Amino acid sequence: MIVELDFLDHWKTRLLSRLLDTETAPLHVIRLWAHCQTRKTNRFADWNPAILSAVCRWNGDAQEFWDAMLQTFCRSEDGCLIAHQWDEVNAGLICSWSNGAKGGRPKKPTGNPPVNPEPIPVNPDITRGVTYREEKIEKIDSSLPTPSVSDPELDSLRSRINKWFRRREGTDWQPAELKALKLVVKLKTSESDLQLLDARYETKNKYRRKDIMTLLNNWNTEIDRCKSGDDDSQQSLPIASAHKKQTDWMDSL
């Protein structure tokens, strides 16, 4: 039997408690529902106030209880007292009763299992003249990644850049970095330009690029900056010029 979660606070329950002037009213309704489950029906012919009061264990006025139940959880139809919507709420329970009357759940088949028409191979480890072990080794080999062909020029430049950025040799580069590095290798940078970059990054020039990806994306620009001399010595030129002007002014005295 199913009792809805909001049963105690449902408006019908609260109305019945008020009509009967007692908070125990829900207990009498549950006794009626239990009777429905026992009898496997929510329709009761030829019932009267006395019978309903006896089933629900109501000790007060039988007619008063009858009238209150008709206003809330019961209805009268064709001379029968019906527990209103009990069959709808407990539809699953009623369905189980119906299936039980038909014999319930079908029994598992008994007897010998069906014969498999397909013959079982005598030696399943050997197929097409190749052993199972050889097939397994072949699958493992095919699943391994194919090693990439080493490019000496690319490896040399990568090792050089690793030193510039204090990156440990053997550290894996990100795919985007490798892609940018391949584009730089195609530029065929001269050794003299690479030496300019060596000096710039090994001396930690404050205008150098701060990460590898930025350097690779601005490779030729960085070389041009090396050649134009945008380093600390260039920044000291205005100071030297001012010092020279001060000296010339003192010499004129």
Image (spheres, helix red, strand yellow):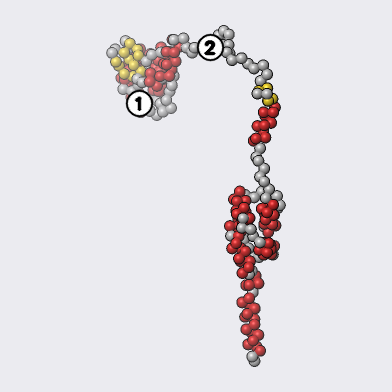
Specify the quadrant of the image occupied by residue 77.
top left
Q: Residues within 10 Å of mark 1 (few under 14, many from 20)?
A: some
Q: Residue placed at 65% from the left, 32% from the top?
A: 139
In front here: 81 or 59? 81
Q: In terms of secondary structure, where does tag 1 sit?
A: helix
- Image location of residue 73, percent across then percent down: 35, 21
Specify the quadrant of the image occupied by residue 141.
top right
Report the Cα–Cα distance between label 2 and label 1.
Answer: 47 Å
In front here: 7 or 136? 136
Q: Can residue 151 be seen in this view?
A: yes
Q: Residue placed at 47% from the left, 12% from the top?
A: 104
Q: Name the residue carrying label 1.
A: 12
Q: How many marks?
A: 2
The single residue placed furthest to the top in the displayed view is 111
Is residue 185 positioned above or below 11 on the image?
below
In the rendered image, the quadrant that contains the N terminus is top left
**Amino acid type of the residue that numbered disc 2 sits on in the rendered structure:** Lys
Q: Name the residue carrying label 2.
A: 108
